[in-house]
Amino acid sequence: QGQLVESGGGLVQAGGSLRLSCAASGRTFSGYAMGWFRQAPWKERELVARIKWSDGSTWYTDSVKGRFTISRDNAKNTVYLQMNSLEPEDTAVYYCATKPSLLVAYDYWGQGTQVTVSS
């Protein structure tokens, strides 16, 4: 069935940038959309950004609008999350996941990558 593998996390100072990658190994991205989620300690997992496969349209949660950009490279079977102007509040484990259809929840998850933003 393959797997999703996130990479690109790390430690960065506030105001810095990171680019996360989500590569599909052993499978091709398909379905409705790909999302990036994050989960900070003691908080619920939240959807940060989403890109639809059909038209490439994107959605962002308010707290990251203007700072984060989700994109895809179909040839490389990879989805990216460019994160600029990082803030300590962005510290979390970031996950990518696939959404098979509009009415079905995200069902296939990567293992996560840690992002830590120091003040």
Image: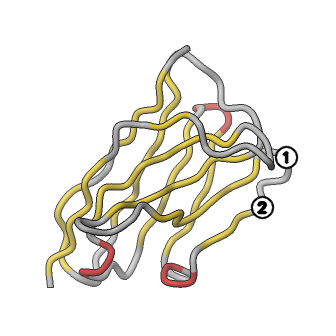
Q: Position of residue 40 (x, y in %)?
A: 29, 66
Say left or right for 51 vs 78. Answer: right
Q: Secondary structure at mark 1?
A: loop
Q: Position of residue 91 (x, y in %)?
A: 26, 70
Q: Residues within 10 Å of mark 2 (few under 14, many from 20)?
A: few
Residue under label 2: 57
Q: Which mark is residue 110?
A: none
Residue shown at the point (39%, 41%) measured from the top left: 6
Disc 1/disc 2 C-alpha distance (Å): 8 Å
- Quick check: 101 above or below 65? above
Of 43 and 5, nearer the camera is 43
The quarter of the rendered structure image containing the N terminus is top right
- Quick check: 22 above or below 71? above
Residue shown at the point (72%, 37%) measured from the top left: 100
Q: Which mark is residue 54?
A: 1
Outermost residue toward the right in this view: 55
Residue shown at the point (14%, 77%) measured from the top left: 118
* Colouring scheme, one of rainbow, by chain, secondary structure, one colour: secondary structure
Q: Quadrant of residue 11?
A: bottom left
Residue shown at the point (64%, 59%) measured from the top left: 50
Say left or right for 17 vs 36. Answer: left
- Quick check: 12 above or below 119? above
In contact (CB < 8 Å): disc 1 and disc 2: yes
Q: What is the count of numbered marks?
A: 2
The quarter of the rendered structure image containing the C terminus is bottom left
Q: Position of residue 87 (x, y in %)?
A: 30, 82
Q: Position of residue 12 (x, y in %)?
A: 19, 69
